[in-house]
Amino acid sequence: MVTSAALLLQFSNQMKSKGLLILVSIRMVIGWIGLVASFLNLGKPPFWVACFVGLYFLSSSLLAKYKIKNKLVSDLGNSSIIGFLVLDFCIILSGFYLTILNHPTGLVATPIQNAIFFSIFFLYQLYIGFFLHRKFSAIMGMFVIVGYIGGIILATLNGAEFFTGYRLVPQTPNRIVLPLEILKVILLLGITICIVRLVSFLLDILENNNKSLVEELNKRETLLLKNDRLVTLGTLASNVAHEINNPLAGIKSMNEFLYEEELSFLTRKEPVWREKEKQLLWKHRTRKEKREDYDLILNFFSFLPKGDLHFLADRCIDIGVDHRSFEGLVKEDTKDWDFVYLWLKFKTMEKANLLVSNAISRTEKVISTFRQFSLPFFEQDKTRVFIGEGIRDILFLYNQYWEISRRLVTEIDDRIEVLVCEPAIKLVWSHLLFNAIQATSPNSGEIKVTVRLKNEKEVEVLIADNGLGISIPLQNQIFQPFFTTKEKGEGIGLGLYISKEIIKNQNGKIDFESQPGKTTFSVILPVAE
């Protein structure tokens, strides 16, 4: 899976390549200007200076363009690029100073008056500030201004006239007018400040956008990972359910077989055992009564062998048979005692068979629910289902929470049918009920589930709990993805978001009301026609 970090790295490399292409284009413009200047100054002193500057910028720009096209920029750090830019500034300033020094006397002010090519470096500044570092852009801007002032000083030392009057006079090839140069320096400084502030403003916007992009990418990545885990868990649940179902079917079949064998054996030994059973007395005993009756049976039938006596006492107490049913029997009634022992053994087997059957049925119900969760929710067709039956399945799944000390109250109309995707809607009930369980106290929690007709076309499901409630500042956020009020490790904030999407897909609505001590979630779905 492509992570957000990889996407941002790819985006950063693309931006770096685009930025370097802009830099190369600017340098090539400077190189062509240098070559044009060399042709215009053919045979004049500045020829070699302009030719050197032009060839340097053109050759290095062509080499950089080749590297960019061949994807060799990823290993080139910002420090290397800054080094090249500093070298560019030094070369252009050196060319500027050499041009002044090589002009004949009487023309030394001409390079100063024609120094408009310095404006090109402000394109450099814009690039540097946006792509590398805004502070470095400001430093280079000041470097250009200081370099320009240095050129004025150098021209003055080489014989140029330096006019410092307050009135403006025409510039000549050998005259530098201080008011005009001050205006130029102020203009250069103003451009530097404007560019740096503009770039700072643009970078702030870009950084905020990048921060939002990173957060969104991280959320999407987490959601994809969560969905991937759900798919994996669903597949695992389906496979586990299949593996459990096979031995469970064998256990169920063998349990039924053993019961039928015991029943058949008892019927062969005593065909009228059912009539005899009707004459027996039954007794429900408390714990104290069980202990008292156990001792009473041992004393009353003390004439029986020790092994048979304890078997009789154990089975009467366990099954709930009143020992007075056997008061008329004496030690010599061997045939009757054989029937009693056989019947007690069968009733013990019958009770065990019932316990195993109930456990198997409960396990099958849980497996069936898990298998439904493993199915792809939104790819299934909607079917007519009894909405109360699906809710009872989930309540049964969380049965251990009701068996402890929480109180469950249900008012479910089992006659209402809806047209929904059953696995998806069961997942909604699972999320809402488990949220209610987590919100309530294990000792005093109460959860009420209500299913009723809201009107002729809609059914309303209410799941209420007596937990702490949801504070007002958080109520507008609970359906947002990744928002959770639970402790770390108890959830990632996708349950209600997924539930809302499922209900929306089923043409329904989900809402809630909360106050301290009570929260009620309401789900409204269309009734099946």
Image: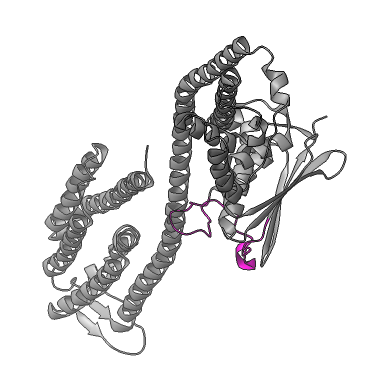
The stretch drawn in magenta includes residue 106: no
| Above or below for 495 versus 334 | below
Q: For residue 268, what is the image quadrant?
A: top right
As drawn, is 254 to the left or to the right of 478? left
Q: Nearer the viewer, residue 281 or 326?
A: 326
Q: Which residue, as the protein is rendered here, is positioned at the far right?
A: 456
Q: Quadrant of the N terminus?
A: top left
Q: Is residue 159 left or right of residue 444?
A: left
In this view, 92 is above or below 317: below
Residue 358's quadrant in the figure? top right
Q: Position of residue 115 (x, y in %)?
A: 27, 67
Vertical position of residue 385 compared to residue 225: above or below: above
Residue at left 19%, top 74%? 151
Res. 479 visible in picture: no
Q: Nearer the viewer, residue 135 or 278?
A: 278
Depth check, front residue: 168 or 368? 368
Q: Is residue 160 above or below residue 93?
A: below
- Assign the magenta stretch its main secondary structure: loop
Q: Which residues are magenta?
A: 465-493
Q: Is residue 26 visible?
A: yes
Q: Magenta stretch containing residue 488, yes or no?
A: yes
